Image: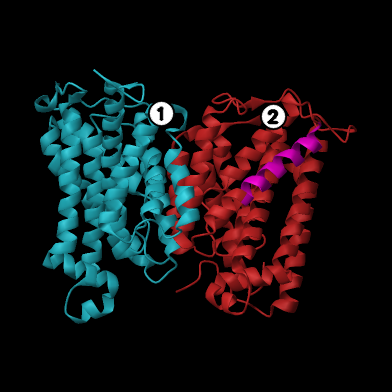
Chain colours: A red, B cyan
């Protein structure tokens, strides 16, 4: 059985770090230049989704768990962020922390339930849990139902930086997302990350070696949920809006698609996938419902012919680790 | 008229009936999922879209060709099953030997395509499908009013469910099917064309979804998102029941429909989430599901 995200290991100690460092430099350079070449809001949106996809990839790519319910963390974090900023008049920094903490708490609860099964059952359970919380969001007072929560202003970060200024907001989003990506990189390459990869390859063997795999999976799930929540919180401040779109199952599907297109189990794949999908949706917006069809076609095409994704193929072709 | 637990009998039995109707659809759909899972080892995410296709085909046949409900009940499952056979033969077959999750991703993509196409032409609004004349009206049973069509849905879906169970568990063809589920290589060695059996099984499972769609058309609005609304609930049903057993899928489907109906009477605000809550409890108490075996 071919594992879902088995990346060929190519002398990873030396080659790997060098190619990854080079790719990281390119990413930082791109982000530094991007606001002057592209529409900043577009780049910021893509960055939020990039973080979301990287958080999702932490589970599918490195533990082999396909979550079909990550909108739960993304969407509820954005609700709590917007709610804290509006109803409690919290500054954006604190509001984002509240949203992210909400996602972490939800991650603990959902994780305890979902990690009891694997494979397709895990996917169905996460989807069902997310749908349950979507239905709660639809009814709850806190979320504003169909209207969502709108923020009159993005607020001032630390009381100093006015986030309503596009470039200030851009710098804030870029720094937070890059820091989070670095954190994910460190997690993956830590001893903890090695155990996660071992669980992906052969869970029973890990159990027989004495690892409590349930705990490792739960921690990975909570980390993934928390970082997905951070992405949702950032997006809420960015668009000054939290709405049902972000908790709907289509959002869970979208993050799967971004990761699949970019490359499952690669460091930079989800980032590239997120930019690709967000750009596509931007250009195809006038075509209305066809966006759904095109997303579906990309799904089918990726699964049938392009399973490594853009970055995975590139890494395979260049024989490096990305 | 009398009261039970302070609830008028009309309301209680009315909701119970609605629950039983929903349960019929849960049973038909989770049965199809279980049959497909048994042979192909994939979870068919397209199932909801194929159910929606069934309802839409019935609607289109009636409005453009004047073909009515009874004919649709036969024609539509065959048409939907045929599209399933094409999907299995040309797409799913190419995923053999890969991780099962790829099957999930592929069928999810197909579901998006099908739903997107219908949404593009019919928007998010529902289309009404007229009930067949023979089944309009209803009977007053004293303690409740029983519309004929709803009685028909329950009886007919019971017949289909138990017919399927009988065909798989008690006939020679079914024994081949079960044997191929256990050990496809050995069954092939006996000269049975297992790949064709897999294709036909997928077609049959999908046909069941199409049939459920036709039956749902006169009750619910025929709308493009009717499939994705129900399929996630059916996934929860499947997690609760476990996909190991056909009878398990049927019983869990009906039982959860009834539980949902009763919840609507006693705690209306929880009715849409009760099945998910039961799923959580079952997972914590018995992770393999009520009728499940292993992982």
Question: Which residue is at a point 14% across and 63% down the rendered structure image?
Answer: B170
Residue A44's place in the image compared with A3, above or below, is above
User: Which of the labelled discs sits on residue B52, or is there none?
Assistant: none
Please name the residue that numbered disc 2 is placed on. Answer: A83
Q: Is residue A78 left or right of residue A135?
A: right
Identify residue for label 1.
B266
Report the chain holding disc 1: B
Q: How dense is the environment of label 2, judged by Cα within 10 Å: few (below 14), some, or many (20 and up)?
A: many
Does B41 sit above or below residue B80?
A: below
Which residue range is magenta in the image? A91-108
Q: In the rendered image, is residue A37 in sight?
A: yes
Vertical side of A321 occupied by B255: above or below = above
Quarter that holds the N terminus of chain B: top left
**SS at mark 1?**
helix
The quadrant in which residue A42 appears is: top right
Residue drawn at the location 73% of the way across and 78% of the way down: A13
Closest to the observer: B243 or A89? Answer: B243
- By secondary structure, the bulk of the magenta-drawn segment is best described as helix
Residue A269 found in image quarter: bottom right
Residue A145: x %, y % from top left: 55, 26
């Amino acid at each position: 059985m071919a594992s879902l995200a088995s990346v060929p290991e190519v002398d990873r100690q030396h080659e790997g770090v060098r190619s990854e460092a080079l790719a990281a430099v390119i990413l930082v350079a791109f982000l530094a230049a991007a606001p002057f070449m592209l529409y900043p809001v577009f780049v910021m949106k893509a960055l939020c989704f990039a973080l979301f996809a990287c958080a999702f990839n932490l589970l599918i790519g490195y533990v082999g768990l396909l979550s079909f319910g990550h909108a739960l963390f993304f969407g509820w974090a954005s609700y709590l962020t917007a709610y804290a900023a509006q109803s409690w008049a919290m500054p954006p920094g604190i509001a984002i922390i509240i949203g992210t903490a909400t996602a972490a708490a939800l991650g603990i609860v959902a994780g305890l339930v979902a990690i009891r099964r694997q494979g397709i059952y895990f996917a169905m359970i996460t989807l069902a849990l997310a749908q349950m919380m979507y239905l709660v969001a639809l009814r709850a007072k806190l979320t504003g139902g169909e209207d969502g929560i709108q923020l009159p202003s993005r607020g001032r970060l630390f009381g100093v930086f006015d986030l309503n200024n596009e470039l200030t907001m851009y710098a804030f989003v870029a720094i937070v997302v890059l820091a989070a990506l670095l954190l994910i990189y460190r997690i993956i390459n830590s001893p903890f990350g090695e155990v996660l990869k071992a669980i992906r390859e052969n869970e029973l063997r890990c159990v027989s070696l004495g690892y409590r795999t349930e705990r490792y999976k739960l921690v990975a799930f909570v980390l993934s949920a928390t970082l997905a929540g951070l992405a949702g919180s950032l997006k809420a401040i960015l668009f000054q809006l939290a709405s049902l779109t972000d908790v709907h199952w289509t959002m869970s599907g979208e993050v799967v698609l971004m990761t699949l297109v970019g490359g499952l189990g690669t460091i930079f794949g989800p980032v590239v996938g997120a930019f690709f999908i967000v750009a596509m949706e931007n250009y195809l917006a006038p075509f209305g419902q066809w966006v759904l069809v095109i997303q579906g076609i990309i799904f089918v095409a990726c699964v049938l012919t392009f399973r490594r994704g853009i970055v995975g193929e590139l890494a395979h072709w260049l024989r490096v680790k990305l | 008229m009398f009261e039970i637990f302070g609830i008028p009998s009309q309301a209680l039995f009315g909701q119970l009936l609605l629950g039983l109707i929903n349960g019929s659809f849960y049973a038909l759909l989770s049965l199809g999922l279980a049959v497909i899972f048994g042979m192909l080892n994939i979870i068919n995410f397209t199932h909801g879209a194929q159910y929606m296709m069934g309802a839409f085909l019935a609607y289109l046949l009636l409005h453009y060709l004047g073909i009515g409900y009874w004919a649709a009940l036969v024609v539509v499952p065959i048409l939907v099953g045929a599209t399933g056979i094409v999907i299995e033969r040309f797409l799913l077959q190419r995923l053999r030997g890969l991780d099962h999750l790829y099957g999930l991703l592929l069928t999810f993509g197909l579901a998006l395509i099908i739903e997107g196409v219908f949404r593009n032409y019919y928007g998010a609004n529902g289309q009404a499908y007229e009930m067949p004349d023979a089944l309009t009206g209803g009977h007053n049973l004293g303690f409740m009013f029983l519309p004929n069509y709803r009685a028909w849905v329950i009886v007919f879906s019971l017949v289909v469910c138990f017919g399927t169970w009988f065909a798989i568990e008690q006939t020679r063809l079914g024994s081949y099917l079960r044997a191929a589920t256990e050990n496809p290589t050995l069954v092939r060695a006996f000269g049975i064309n297992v790949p064709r059996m897999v294709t036909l099984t997928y077609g049959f499972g999908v046909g069941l979804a199409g049939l459920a769609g036709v039956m749902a058309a006169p009750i619910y609005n025929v709308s493009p998102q009717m499939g994705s609304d129900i399929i996630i609930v059916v996934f929860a049903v499947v997690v609760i029941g476990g996909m190991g057993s056909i009878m398990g899928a049927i019983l869990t489907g009906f039982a959860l429909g009834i539980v949902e109906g009763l919840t609507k009477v006693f705690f209306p605000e929880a009715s849409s989430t009760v099945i998910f809550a039961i799923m959580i409890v079952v997972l914590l108490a018995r992770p393999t599901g009520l009728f499940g075996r292993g992982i």
